[in-house]
């Protein structure tokens, strides 16, 4: 899948069962589920790295040019390819949105190596121009979106007071089942390959 239409269809396949009509899962509700699912997926998605060239000498650095930075996990400096990230980590803190304060003064032209998780997008959803969810992790993302959609539907019914107790319980149970499925799949996806040893970089 590469765009919104495909993700809508895939999420509806998860959501529609013998107790709910397809017409319940309207585009607006499905899209809100997808947006909420992206937030959760972003928090557990694969850790990425990129290099950032310092523009202004100093302790304060503006990293707004790093595309879709959701959470910063570590910084290494000075950086060049082939170095071990853990051997060059430095301390940092946020002082404002997109503004870092480092515990080292860096010079213009220096390279910082950022280790981070990104804010993911689905093409045509909320103005996004491309999908960034990894193809191998689409199902994980859809489980998170399914849990969110069930809870959104439950909230919708609660506000209109049209939900029966059985329907409410079914939606709650399905949301929980999606979360369990996501947790199991996440464990499987993250149990192989190289692992980041956070203790070595002071996190």
Image: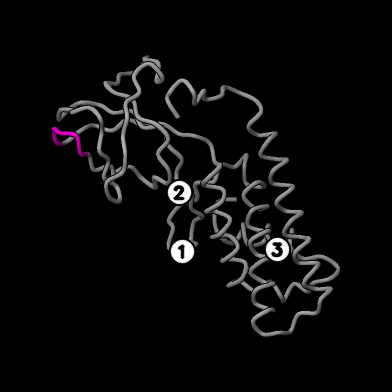
Q: Above or below — where is 82 with respect to 59?
A: above
Q: According to the image, what is the colour scheme of the structure?
A: one colour
Label 3 sits on residue: 12
Q: Quadrant of residue 92?
A: top left
Label 1 sits on residue: 126
Residue under the point 66% across and 39% down: 186
| Mark 2 or 1, closer to the camera | 2
Q: Is residue 106 left or right of residue 136?
A: left
State which quarter of the image contains the C terminus. top left
Label 2 sits on residue: 119
Q: Position of residue 160 (x, y in %)?
A: 67, 85
Spatial separation of the CA atoms under disc 3 and disc 2? 23 Å
Q: Nearer the viewer, residue 47 or 99?
A: 99
Residue under the point 33% across and 42% down: 66
Q: Position of residue 55 (x, y in %)?
A: 17, 36
Task: Say whether disc 3 or disc 1 marks the residue closer to the N-terminus.
Answer: 3
Asked if labels 2 and 3 touch by Cβ distance under 8 angstroms, the answer is: no
Residue numbers of the magenta segment: 56-60
Q: Is residue 147 left or right of residue 37?
A: right
Spatial separation of the CA atoms under disc 2 and disc 1? 13 Å
* Crowd rating for badge 1 (residues with CA inside 10 Å; few <14, some 14–19, many 20+): few
Q: Main secondary structure of the magenta part?
A: strand
Spatial separation of the CA atoms under disc 3 and disc 1? 19 Å
* Crowd rating for badge 2 (residues with CA inside 10 Å; few <14, some 14–19, many 20+): some
């Amino acid at each position: 899948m590469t765009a919104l239409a495909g993700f809508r269809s895939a999420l509806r396949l998860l959501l529609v069962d013998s107790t709910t009509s397809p017409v319940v899962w309207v585009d607006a509700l499905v899209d809100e589920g997808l947006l909420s699912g992206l937030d959760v997926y972003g928090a557990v998605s694969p850790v990425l790295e990129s290099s950032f060239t310092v523009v202004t000498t100093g302790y304060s650095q503006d990293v707004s040019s790093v595309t879709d930075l959701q959470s910063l996990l570590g910084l290494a400096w000075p950086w060049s390819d082939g170095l071990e990230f853990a051997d060059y980590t430095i301390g940092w803190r946020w002082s404002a949105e997109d503004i870092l304060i480092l515990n080292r003064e860096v010079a213009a032209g220096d390279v910082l190596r950022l280790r981070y998780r990104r804010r993911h997008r689905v093409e045509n959803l909320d103005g996004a121009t491309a999908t960034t969810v990894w193809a191998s992790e689409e199902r994980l993302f859809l489980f998170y979106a399914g849990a969110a959609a069930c809870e959104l539907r439950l909230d919708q019914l609660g506000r209109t007071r049209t939900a029966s107790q059985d329907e409410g319980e079914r939606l709650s149970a399905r949301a929980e089942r999606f979360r369990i499925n996501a947790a199991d799949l996440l464990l499987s996806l993250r149990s192989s390959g190289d692992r980041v040893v956070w203790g070595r970089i002071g996190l």
